[in-house]
Image: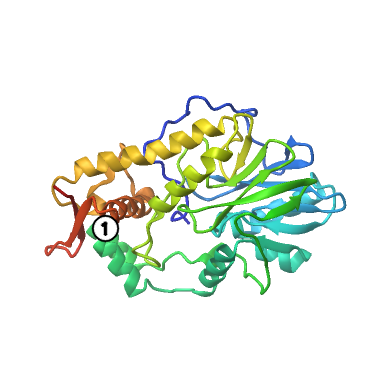
Amino acid sequence: MTEQATLSTASPKTPKGLRYPWEVPPAEGEAIEVAPGVLWFRLPLPMRLDHVNVYALDEGDSWTVIDTGFASRRAKEIWRGLMAGPLGGKPISRVVVTHHHPDHIGLAGWLQTEFGAELVTTRTAWLTARMLTLDVQEVPVAEALAFYRKAGMASALYDKRASERPFNFADVVAPLPLGFTRIRQGDVIRMGGRDWEVHIGNGHAPEHATFWSRDDNLVIAGDQILPSISPNIGVYPTEPMADPIGEWLEACERFVPLAREDHLVVGGHKLPFTGLPTRLKQLIENHHSALRRLLAYIDTPKSASECFAPLFKRSIGEAEYGLALVEAVAHLSHLYQAGEATRSLRAADGAWVYQRKG
């Protein structure tokens, strides 16, 4: 499942001004207490970004867990070990999901059905995940193939994708039963003895929930704010005229006044860190810089597949190609929708090509 993972648009490998209280993550099946009553675990992912962080907040007689990992036999075994070990045999009463991507919601339905946990997430996250788990495709649909062709996908890879069974959410996401509890912008939720303000992000995933503690310095950020990589921001066949770049930049700008130097940010990947004001500025500037480079690059008409060099500044292999393509589409479409570039269909291959105005 590479389409929701993370691909950096040439952001710094170790951003300056950030501090990492823990240099080493918890080993599989073990926990690190990042704050009183807040445990940090890791679950494996079968991809280059090989882990997802999950958290457990002590409710006294039970636990609230944040995100879940993929639905797999191995992940279920790890969860059972965590319940018997670091979680001390207390039940999981609530699962809070930051966003709909499979590495975050994959086992939410299993925790609901097997252990009676309540599911808490945003409406868009739940609806999107449930829709996608029910939409199993044995062959690529025509709309997806048309999207790839219009993005200028390399012909050999296009032919391969056209003949293969596509990735399905249901491959790594447990069935989601009916019923969830909605959270939205401005809500306050009680977890782990703290009141948390809900602030909604966008761009990486629609209606992505982040949680800001009123009682100490913790921020649970999911994939909205990551320390050493940029969240993948892509356009997909489900909404080909979406503008996730604009939405993501708006969310980052909205978070800037909330950020404090002492905030301890615990996210969906990589290590917890402090220095949030600096990181938000870096993430914003990273994408503005990418847009400037891209605008200079499209002095002549180019498709999304021809724009990897200015965006990523490194070679893109087949494993990363899908991520790179949807992110290139997102940046080009943002320039087009902002009125800074034109768009036309190239007769030779049917791809959209973009050119800066003037």
The answer to whether 258 is drawn above or below residue 356 in the figure is above
Where residue 246 sits in the image (x, y, percent)?
39, 51
Q: Which residue is mark 1?
A: 153
* Kind of residue sitting beneath label 1: Met
Q: How crowded is the residue under tag 1: few (<14 C-alpha within 10 Å), some, or many (20+)?
A: many
Residue 60 versus residue 215: which sits nearer the camera?
215
Identity of the residue drawn at 63% across and 56% down: 97
For the question of whether residue 293 can be seen, the reply is yes
Where residue 238 sits in the image (x, y, percent)?
40, 67
Q: Is residue 60 left or right of residue 138?
A: right
Q: Quadrant of residue 208?
A: bottom right
SS under mark 1: loop
Q: Is residue 73 left or right of residue 316?
A: right
Where residue 68 sits in the image (x, y, percent)?
65, 54
Where residue 343 sits in the image (x, y, percent)?
20, 58
Q: Is residue 91 left or right of residue 265?
A: right
The answer to whether 158 is drawn above or below residue 22 in the figure is below
Identity of the residue drawn at 37% across and 71% down: 140
| Number of numbered discs overlaid on the protein picture | 1
The answer to whether 40 is drawn above or below residue 68 in the figure is above
Residue 184 versus residue 42: which sits nearer the camera?
184
For the question of whether residue 111 can be seen, the reply is no
Q: How is the image coloured?
A: rainbow
Residue 346 versus residue 159: which sits nearer the camera?
346
